[in-house]
Structure formats: structure tokens, C-alpha cells
Amino acid sequence: MKIIHTVGARPNFMKAAPVWSAINKITDFSQILVHTGQHYDRLMSDIFFKELRMPVPDYNLNIGSNSHARQTAAIMIKFEELVNELKPDLVLVYGDVNSTVAAAMVCSKLSISIAHVEAGLRSFDRKMPEEINRLITDQLADLLFTPSKDGDDNLIKEGIPKSKIHFVGNVMIDTLVRLLPKAAKPNNFQDLQQYILVTLHRPSNVDDPKSLRSIIKKLQDVSKSIPVIFPVHPRTKKMIAENELNIQNNVNFHLIEPLGYLDFLGLMKDATAVITDSGGIQEETTYLNIPCITVRENTERPITVSLGTNHLIGKDHYKIKNLVNNAVDRKKRSNTIPPLWDGKASERIAETLVVYCKNL
Ligand code: UD1
């Protein structure tokens, strides 16, 4: 059996790593790793392969950045050539980025089995490019691995047969559980006891200058009482420069380069609170019991709000200050870790794949 793992952007890497190693342990499948090159900077890509102990990709399609249509189409053209040459039995795709949907569309038309890891998540907001990618990928996939039961419910409502859906838990948490003991704050932040960690990159926040300006202003206000550490995504960096926001770092406000997995996790696990618009970080903070302030109107991960530590604030940026104050004052808060976020999701995926592939 020949399996291709397709990855392209930063959030894919920590999902693929544990699945790769689980398959490696229990089967003699031949595994091929294809990187589309959607993310290409060292700090957005290479560092993760090293830290996650992923093999160097067998193929890199070197697609790079472009408009959605051009990027997705370019991946499809090169990926089609590659799968025609390699003839895999099954292709694994991860999450909801353009690389995910591009690979799924290619395989679907070539009648190659598709397994989608992190299936069924829905924000019900079709203005998000990721929501379109999720909807299409799930319609095309033959095996749908869900991280939470709400994913199963969404898929069933969309007419996906139950037999294709496998509730396995959260592979991102597999990586977190494995690497938590190795995670440590970067040296220059070792002495900070309390601080707020920030990540922002969603077009709805950073591509709109008014919104970006307003959020940065609130973060600067927060930094008057507690240090703020903000590793800046390339999209956000570009928008800060284009809008001439001229942000000055000071002893309490740290705009820094994107961090690797271990540095970021090291900061996240001890943060007073995290402010983000990422999907995965909503899950990681829930697992770590760290308050998470999500600057989005909706989430495709509602379990992080119902069971976890997540607060959605939408465009009400003024809420940041109060929520940060609550986090600073908080006594121990007991969260609940969602079912099957136990570090073993990838093992369940590997076992399911063995059974599925026997019947191919
Ligand atoms: C992509 C995903 C998003 C995910 C995010 C994580 C889609 C539709 N979006 O968004 O779901 O949460 O990755 O980071 O797939 N750039 C660089 N270096 C890089 C990569 C990007 O400088 O290595 C810059 C380019 O200017 C590019 C911009 O960032 O135009 C955006 O990159 P892109 O991959 O298009 O989308 P992301 O915003 O990173």
C-alpha cells in the first residue's frame, strides 16, 4: 500500500507528524510526504519539520503565495502530475488550507481514495476561505476523521454516510502531548511571570486596516499593565508595513518573528492569556487550561467554548481589556478536556486505515 501525506501550510505540519509516525509503527505501508510549498519561509515551514521530527518531504511542489484561485490551481496541476507518476492507493489531507482542497479535488477525479484528517468542522461562515475548503474536501473524502462529535453531526447533516465518518479525536493534541515536556520559553522571555501571547493572521482582522489598527491599539493598551508578546505572521507583517503602523517595541510590547513549535508552546503553556484568531490555538489553550480570547465572530471549534477556555469576542475589541484583567485575577479555573483529546488520535487513524486499505 502506498500512502501520500499532503501538507502545505504551517498548521498542517503538527497534524501530519503524529499520523506519519503512527502509521510507521503499525504497518508496512510505504509513506510519501508531499509539501506543496504554500508556506515556504524557514520560520513558517522548515523549522517545524525539524522540531516535529518529520522526514524531509520527498517532494516539494514549491507553489508559494498567490491569489486563492492561482495558488489552488497551481497545486492541482503539479499534484496531478505527481500522483499520476506515483500512483498512490490513498492520499491523506489535513485541515482546511488551500493545499488540502487542491489535493482532494485532484484525487477525487483520479478515483484515488482520500482521507481527511480534521473533518467536519464548520464555522458556518462562507466568507472564510477555510470554510469553503472544508465543505468541498469533506464532500470528496472517502474517510473522514473528526476531532469532536460536533464534526460528525455536521457531516451527517450534509448527507455524508455514517460509514465514512470516524470520530478519532484531535491529532494536534497528539503532538502537543508528545512535545510538551520539551517545550520551553525562548531565552529572552525566561524571566516573565505573567504575559499575554498574541497571534493574528485572519484576513478579516489583518487585511482590513481599520480592524488591524483597532486591535493593535487595544494590545498597546493592555501592554501598559502586562507584557504582550506577539510573534507576527508574514501576512500581518505585510499589512502592518503597508498601513505604516510604525509600531515601536518597548519593554512591555514585543513584536517578534514567527516562532517554532517548541518556543511557541513553551510560551503558550505559561501564558496568562492568549489572544488569537487561529483555529488550532483555540484547541491547544483549551487543552492547556489557558484563557483564550478569540478575535473572531464564530468558530469551527465550538467545543473549545462549551467545554474549554475559549471566549469569542468578534469585532468587540474593547472586550480584550476586561478579559485580560479577568485572566490576571483568575483563581484556578477547571476546564474539561474534550473526549478523545488524549494523545492517541493518530493511533486510531492508523488502525482505521489498515482496515480500510485491506478492503481496497
Ligand atoms: C494559510 C491558511 C490558513 C492558515 C494559515 C496559517 C489558506 C486559505 N489559509 O493562511 O487557513 O490558518 O495559513 O498560517 O490556505 N507568506 C510568506 N511566507 C510564507 C507564507 C506566506 O511571506 O512562508 C506571506 C505571503 O505574502 C502570502 C501571505 O503570507 O501572500 C499569506 O499566505 P497564504 O498561504 O496565502 O495564507 P495564510 O494567510 O498564511
Image: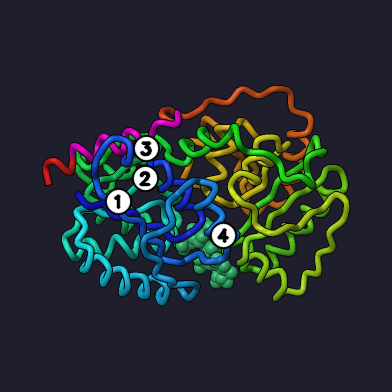
* 242 and 180: which is toward the camera: 180
Q: Earlier in the sequence, mark 2 or mark 1?
A: 2
- Helix, strand or loop for disc 4: helix
Residue plotted at (56% across, 34% down): 286
Residue 242 drawn at (x, y percent): 70, 76
**Residue 348 in magenta?**
yes
Residue plotted at (64% across, 34% down): 290
Q: Earlier in the sequence, mark 3 or mark 4?
A: 4
- Asked if marks 1 and 3 touch (Cβ < 8 Å), the reply is no
Question: How far, Cα to Cα, is label 3 from label 4?
Answer: 23 Å
Residue 112 drawn at (x, y percent): 19, 58
Q: How many marks?
A: 4
Q: Earlier in the sequence, mark 4 or mark 2?
A: 2
Question: On the picture, is 119 further left or further right than 198?
Answer: left
Frontmost of labels 4 and 1 is 1
Q: Which residue is label 3 attached to? A: 346
Residue type at mark 2? Trp
Q: Residues within 10 Å of mark 4 (few under 14, many from 20)?
A: many
Q: Which residue is label 4 attached to? A: 44
Q: Which residue is label 1 attached to? A: 31
Residue type at mark 3? Ser
- Helix, strand or loop for disc 2: helix
Q: Earlier in the sequence, mark 4 or mark 1?
A: 1
Residue 241 sits in which quadrant?
Answer: bottom right
Question: How far, Cα to Cα, is label 2 from label 3?
Answer: 8 Å
Residue 293 drawn at (x, y percent): 65, 43
What span is colored magenta in the figure? 342-355
Question: How far, Cα to Cα, is label 1 from label 3?
Answer: 15 Å
Residue 329 sits in which quadrant?
Answer: top right
